[in-house]
Amino acid sequence: MKNLYRILFILPALLLALAFLPACGEDEGETDDNNTPDEQAKTDDVLPDEVIVEEEVDVDNVEPLPEYPTETPTSNQVDDIAANITFFDQDDKEWTLGHFYKKKKLVWLIFSAYDCPYCNTEKGDLPAIYKQEYIDKGLEIIFIENGMLSGPQPEKEPAKVKAMREIMIDNYGDSAKFVYGYLKLDMQSKMGKYIQSGYPTNALIDATSMKILNYFEGWDTSLADNQERAIQFWLDEL
């Protein structure tokens, strides 16, 4: 008998919820003039506790990553398999290069340093290259600041990276919304597979195979056109 009462109690609520489903397909800019916020709040109040609305699951965060290719001893030569380095973003969320394997077509991986003038010049040149047409074709830029050069203080890195990212977005808008990251101390040895002599270090990576397509260290604004042409070529070629 209790189950019968429970069914009779839940059934009207479920029918009421189903009646609202078509509204989920409306454009975000459309509103219902006949339903004010206060009236909506009253409607919400009548839903019983037994009706549970489940949050949407982010599939990209639960599906397993593809098995990463076997790495080569170095990651600084053309045709090397890029080392699957681990880094953390401005929210201290952990990422690996493998998160972009087969998810993107082309990855431009950059290792930078805060006090390197050439690195700062390159950082300012990136938004002009991070164009929507390239993003749509599968480009991602991963800009990693190695704060360990000025002393191992990883607890300060998320805030520093977040501030840097916000300044870039304030200055350049959406064209500065590429991936920003930092390294923790135990990541230094793997990053060493990329470094030959100095910063910034640039590796253009085929994200369908993780092979390095071009590699160079240093930066000058005059290199921007050449790198953009390389990006255009590989996005069309891959």
Image: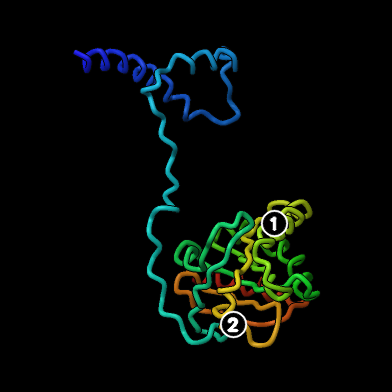
Give the spatial CA distance, label 2 vs label 1.
24 Å
Say the numbered circle drawn on residue 45. Answer: none
Question: At which x and y percent is residue 166?
Answer: 73, 53
Which residue bears the numbered disc 2? 192
Question: At which x and y percent is residue 103?
Answer: 47, 61
Residue at 67%, 62% (x, y): give it. Answer: 157
Q: Which amino acid does label 1 sit on?
A: Ala
Identify the residue at the far left of this view: 1
Question: At which x and y percent is residue 80?
Answer: 50, 84
Label 1, secondary structure: give it: helix
Q: Which amino acid does label 2 sit on?
A: Gly
Report the front residue among 32 and 179: 179
Which is in the foreground here, disc 2 or disc 1? 1
Compared to 209, does 41 lie above or below?
Answer: above
Compared to 51, does 68 lie above or below?
Answer: below
Mark 2, residues whose alpha carbon is within 10 Å: few (<14), some, or many (≥20)?
A: some
- Report the quarter where the N terminus lies: top left
Task: Point out the tag, 2 or 1, that comes first from the N-terminus.
Answer: 1
Question: At which x and y percent is residue 109?
Answer: 60, 71
Mark 1, residues whose alpha carbon is within 10 Å: few (<14), some, or many (≥20)?
A: some
Label 2, secondary structure: give it: loop
Displayed quadrant of residue 137: bottom right
Which residue bears the numbered disc 1? 159
